[in-house]
Amino acid sequence: MNKPLSGITRITCLICAAGLAAVIFLPIWRIDLVAPQYPEGLFMQIYANKLGGDVEIINGLNHYIGMNTIHEKDFVEFIVLPYLIAALAIFGLLSAIINRKWFFLAWFIFLLLFGVIAMTDFYIWEYNYGHNLDPNAAIKVPGMAYQPPLIGYKQLLNFAAYSMPDSGGWIFVIVGVCLTGCTVLELRKNRKNRSPYSNLPLLILSVSLLSSCNSGPKEIPYGQVGCEHCKMTIMDKRFGCELVTTKGKAYFFDDLSCLTSYLKAKDGDDAEQGEKFVADYGGSGKLIPLHLAILINSPSAHGPMGGTIIAFENDKDAEAFLDKNPGKLLDGSMNQ
């Protein structure tokens, strides 16, 4: 999760951050009321820090049915909401600058929590607004509540009420959809980039525990047999690998990358319980137990399938190689 983001995700972060900054100045939600006596309709817009539209007329109508009047000073949300939205915008900008997946995902989770809490708060306000009625109101309809819809349409006496996101709200929706897409993209990319050597530490451990159960490797018939994983003919004696299952069956491989990919695909199968051998990079073709091998990751090692990890039987040969080539010893963790 500490890896950099893709280019398209960073660009999306910048665009979304700009969109969120604009939301501070745009109406986020809109409630429309339509009735025969108001053919042109009434509306109320909710901004981050204020109300807009026909608020005073709506307050006058609400008086007759006992609903509370609406005043900006009654809502603490109008004080904190601009700061929260600004924080979301800055978070998005930093995601593009810092360029790390964990930071981007933290922003995405922050945005999701903000959306859930904001809609829950809006529902609670609507519920209290529509249910806490003045018992001395001029118009009383037994059992009638006037809670506006959270989203969509609802008939309230002779008024048709519509509740929908306004321009700022739709920006929130678009930002959420874009960031969801980017999150899926980054998670898939992370899965594809997983190292083929990621299972090797466990394999080495299993070899250490079970090596005494096997009878040893068979000679790899170089130039005559294909790799069990990639099916290419095994040619290079410096990289050959072998798996001997607990039943004594031998499988041959081009190099360590093919062996680890094969075992990963056979996860849980009997094959994984076998013993693994790897050729000494010295070129003699001698196979040594994987858990006893001295492993080096070097860009100078070009395995048949692109592998960069090679094995030596003794320290002297390994040190001689490192004296002439770049690389580093692997201390059991080959997840690189």
Image (cartoon, grey):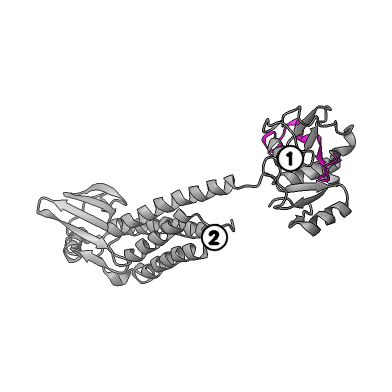
Answer left or right for 38 relative to 272.
Answer: left
For mark 2, does the 10 Å Cα neighbourhood hold few (<14), some (14 to 19), or many (20 or more) residues?
A: some
Between 50 and 311, the one nearer to me in the picture: 311
**For the residue labelled by badge 1, is the local secondary structure a helix, a strand or a loop?**
loop
Q: What residue is rendered at 80% in x and 47% in y?
A: 311
Q: Residue at x 40, y 63 (%)?
A: 17
**Foreground pick, 230 / 17:** 230
Indicate left or right for 147 with 124 as reference. left
> Is residue 152 among the parts visible in the rendering?
yes
Eye-nearest disc, 1 or 2? 1
Q: Which residues are magenta?
A: 263-284
Q: For the residue labelled by badge 2, is the local secondary structure a helix, a strand or a loop?
A: loop
Asked whether residue 258 is drawn in magenta, I would say no
Total labels drawn: 2
Rounded to the nearest angstrom, the CA distance separating label 1 from label 2 is 33 Å
Q: Is residue 45 left or right of residue 202?
A: left
Q: Which of the 4 image quarters holds residue 279? A: top right
Look at label 1 and name its amino acid.
Asp
| Above or below for 220 versus 111 | above
Decide which of 161, 23 is in the foreground and name it.
23
Name above or below for residue 100 compared with residue 333.
below
Local packing at callout 1 (Cα closer than 10 Å; few below 14, some 14-19, many 20+) is many
Query: Residue under circle 1?
Result: 255
The answer to if 267 sits in the magenta stretch is yes
Residue that mark 2 sits on: 100
Return the x and y of residue 72 as percentages of the image width and height: 28, 70
Q: Nearer the N terminus, badge 1 or badge 2?
A: 2
Please state the horizontal and vertical placement of residue 218, each as a whole percent of the image: 85, 31
Residue 300 in picture, x, y percent from top left? 71, 52
What residue is rendered at 19% in x and 54% in y? Answer: 33
The amino acid pointed to by label 2 is: Arg
